[in-house]
Amino acid sequence: MTTPADLAPVEPELSEAEKQFNDLIAADSRIEPRDWMPESYRKSLIRQISQHAHSEIIGMQPEANWITRAPSLKRKAILMAKVQDEAGHGLYLYSAAQTLGISREEMTDQLIAGKAKYSSIFNYPTPTWADMGAIGWLVDGAAICNQVPLCRASYGPYGRAMVRICKEESFHQRQGFEILLELMQGTPAQREMAQDAVNRWYWPSLMMFGPPDDESPNSAQSMAWKIKRFSNDELRQRFIGMLIPQAEVLGVTLPDPKLRWNEEKGAYDMSDIDWDEFHEVLAGRGPTNSQRLQRRREAHEEGAWVREAAAEYARKQAAARAEVA
Amino acid sequence: MTDSEVHVSVDQVELSAELEGDQGAVATPDVAEYALWLGDDALILAQQLGWWISRAPELEEDVALGNIALDLLGHARSLLRYAGTASGRTEDDLAYFRNEPEFRTVWLFQQPNGDFAHTIARQFVASVYLDALYPRLTSSNDPTLAAIAAKAAKEVAYHRDHATQWVLRLAGGTDESRRRMIVALHDVWPYVEELFRDEPLIDALEGVAVRPSTLRADFDAVVDAVFTEAGLELPKGMISSGGGRRGSHFSTMGYLLAEMQVLARQHPEATW
């Protein structure tokens, strides 16, 4: 068995190791935790996977807001299961990041200190039940477009975690679609609620794919390393193509009067995205950034005595066993 | 497998997996009242545990408490659906459109979440009680209740294990956790007595319902074993007369129902 110390890159062997790494990437093979990897690849992955994990954890809050008020017991059960899935996703992803040499504690501290990023979409509020539908349909839909290619990400633990996550996300998207469908087939007040939620979540969900390709600082390197497989703009177009027929089935209007297929370009024409809003929310000036972090911090701090108790109990148990042995 | 079977809707997946006792049986008024007792207990506890999801001390507990809440909500839905067959009401009619005095939840299940120790103390008592109840209810002469109990019995055995582990950890962890665990047990113990009280309805349901007083010995034995291991003393002190089975409720029940029912009542004609 190798230990982390054995894996430390030694100067003369570095080029050979680097060559192996490059060969693995070129052959579309997986990089595993035991393999040598460039420090920048490791750092880039830690950044991406931990941001992704944080997004799952912060992303529990907008929906948890409706668990106690879900309008039917069936919806309550589905929503509970969904938010619980998100906690599970956070756990897989933190575990994947841990294989790169960072602890869950460090990542949690970074999140609570406001030093780590998470998906800006979760800084929007969820004032109505229809937001549960719009989040599932649009936000989880966008997440799937982003995440399906990640199942083939070059780093093994990340790719494998994503396979499992994507399976559950597709269920999440369907349940969101179904919430909206039920609302659109319901009373005038329900239909109005659904359209209003789609109006509020449509643009933020398009922003989830990140800045346009010519302004995306980390994209090119991630593509070269095969962590990322498609550009932001490619994925955004793919998502819009998926939404249009679904919006028709729902009977909702996508809030962009310029949206239409452009045969010549082989892409959709659309209005300009308000990137000022994106950057504002990203910079911490969205509606609920402070609330999200406060809630996470409170849960963490109020749970500290419980985690300490569990650790202390485990220590005492281990000591008692050692004494017997 | 045909195409239509492959593309099952969320509804079908969820119903077949979660709900027992949907075989078209109609409950008598007495059986319905008993199903309401158990269903309301499960519903109110699920509602309270659901609050913890995204607020638990660690992610593993977000998942675990979520699991338990989901199990209990499944029991509630099966039981309320069956209870509703006596009066032509759905599970949602019963959950969302009854007023406080019409609920039948005992006070233990209504105790507020409090800190994690209080949630665990309540969960421990509830799970030990339910783990005594459901295995016995599987022998009920009423096949629907027996089927619901058979599914629930496996789940509450896990809930009991989860709560027991936490009682041991908190009691045997730090001074602070031990202090909190003792306070929490002291706070929930007045509501233990009501769980085992035989209301008049039980006499009318011989062979169908489980007589609550018959569960007490099992409950005491489990509690005694866990408390001995944890070095805890049985809380002594006041006993609350409760009154949940007759529609008289703990002071926080109205707030809980207001939150749970608010959206459904804003749109009484809607389906979701």
Image (cartoon, helix red, strand yellow):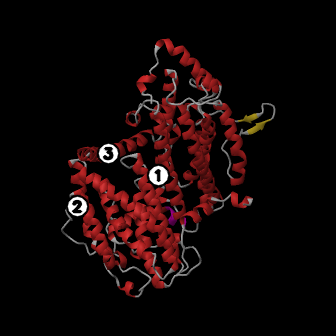
Mark 3 surroundings: few (<14), some (14-19) or many (≥20) residues within 10 A: some
Q: Residue at x 64, y 26 (%)?
A: A213
Amino acid of disc 1: Ala
Does residue B51 appear in this view?
yes
Q: Quadrant of the N terminus of chain B?
A: bottom right
Res B115 seen here:
no
Of badges 1 and 2, the one in the foreground is 2
Which residue is at a point 58% across and 39% down the rendered structure image? Answer: A204
Q: Which residue is situated farthest in the right direction here?
A: A264
Name the element at disc 1.
Answer: helix
Tell me which residue sits at (48%, 83%) in the image.
B141
Residue topped by disc 1: A64
The chain letter under disc 1 is A
* Element type at mark 3: helix
Answer yes or no: do the residues labelled 1 and 2 have beta carbons within 8 Å? no
The answer to whether residue A178 is left or right of residue B146 is: right
Residue with the mark numbered 2: B228
Q: Which label was assigned to residue A201?
A: none
Asked if residue A173 is positioned above or below residue B86 in the image, the reply reads above
Distance from label 3 to label 2 (Cα)?
Answer: 23 Å
**Helix, strand or loop for the magenta stretch, by majority:** helix
User: What residue span does the magenta drawing correspond to?
Assistant: B263-267
* Label 1: few (<14), some (14–19) or many (≥20) C-alpha neighbours in 10 Å: many
Question: Disc 3 designates what residue?
Answer: A307
